[in-house]
Amino acid sequence: MKWELSMFKKKWVYFSLMALVLVAITAFSAHAIGYNKASVLLKDKKVVAGEIDGEIKEWKKELESIEENVEAMEEEESSKQADLEGLQIRFDEVNEMVGQKEAIQKEVDELGTQVNAKKDELKKLSGEIANKQNELDTLNKGILIKKKEPRTLVAGVFIVGKDIAPGRYKVEPVNGFGNYFVNGGSKVNIILGRGDDLFLPEYVFELDEGDEIEATLSVRYTLVE
């Protein structure tokens, strides 16, 4: 009985040692396998991390390039904005000049209209002045003298068409005063003279062919129209 118990104890110790050995071997194997797997995963991660780092560097370069382009575009935009502001200022100046030109042209047109109106008024006034001048000349002179030298006839009797040509005449006394008759006084019967309200200083009438003139003084005959 004691021997069997002793053998049982030995077997239990042996199996316990075997179990410990198996556990140790299993633990070592598991550790080795885990280590190898970890190494593989780590290596893969390094590879992936390296690729990502390379991509990040490329992205950084691309980002820097984009930033440079953005800065250049901003500078260009700023320059364009300045040019645009300059053009806007020039446009405003030109627009103001155009407005001033239109205002000046409007004033010129208005002045032109006023000038034309004044010209019409002046033309009308010139016509009226000419008419008034003619009236004045008629009132002052009563007649328009022809461009022919006056003729003087002494006192006496004369026949028109023989002694003097027919026509419209203004008769004036050369000196003194006296009677003046045409056709025995039936056509003209006046007293020519100056210095008295009873005398006529001049007289205008038509002498026809065959009229008979009788005067007691020298008379100047001037052809008129």
Image: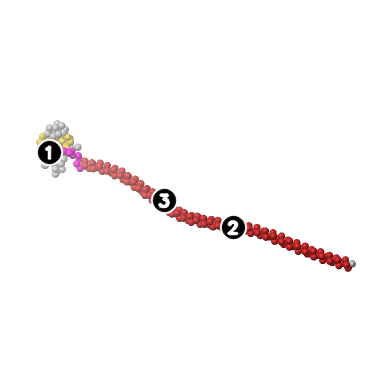
- The residue carrying mark 2 is 54
What residue span does the magenta drawing correspond to? 140-153
Give residue 224's mark.
none
Give residue 95's mark.
3
Determine the residue positioned at 50% across, 56% down: 72
Q: Position of residue 38 (x, y in %)?
A: 68, 60
Up/down of 187 relative to 24, above or below: above
Determine the residue positioned at 55% across, 57% down: 61
Give residue 152's mark.
1
Give the mark toward the camera: 1 or 2: 2
Q: Residues within 10 Å of mark 3 (few under 14, many from 20)?
A: few
Toward which corner of the image does residue 182 lie, by quadrant? top left
Q: Where is residue 173 in the image (x, y as percent from the top left)?
A: 13, 40
Determine the residue positioned at 63% across, 59% down: 46
Q: What residue type is labelled 3?
A: Asn
Q: How crowded is mark 2: few (under 14 residues within 10 Å), some or many (20 or more)?
A: few
Q: Which amino acid does label 1 sit on?
A: Thr
Toward which corner of the image does residue 41 lie, by quadrant? bottom right
For label 2, the SS is: helix
Asked if residue 63 lies left or right of residue 24, the reply is left
- Observer-nearest of 81 and 113: 81
Give the mark toward the camera: 1 or 3: 3
Q: How far apart are marks 1 and 2 (CA)?
A: 140 Å
Up/down of 19 relative to 113, above or below: below
User: Does the image show residue 171?
Assistant: no
Asked if residue 4 lies left or right of residue 95, the reply is right
Name which of mark 1 and mark 3 comes first in the sequence: 3
Asked if residue 40 is among those painted magenta in the image, a careful observer would answer no
Name which of mark 1 and mark 2 comes first in the sequence: 2
Magenta span: chief secondary structure: loop
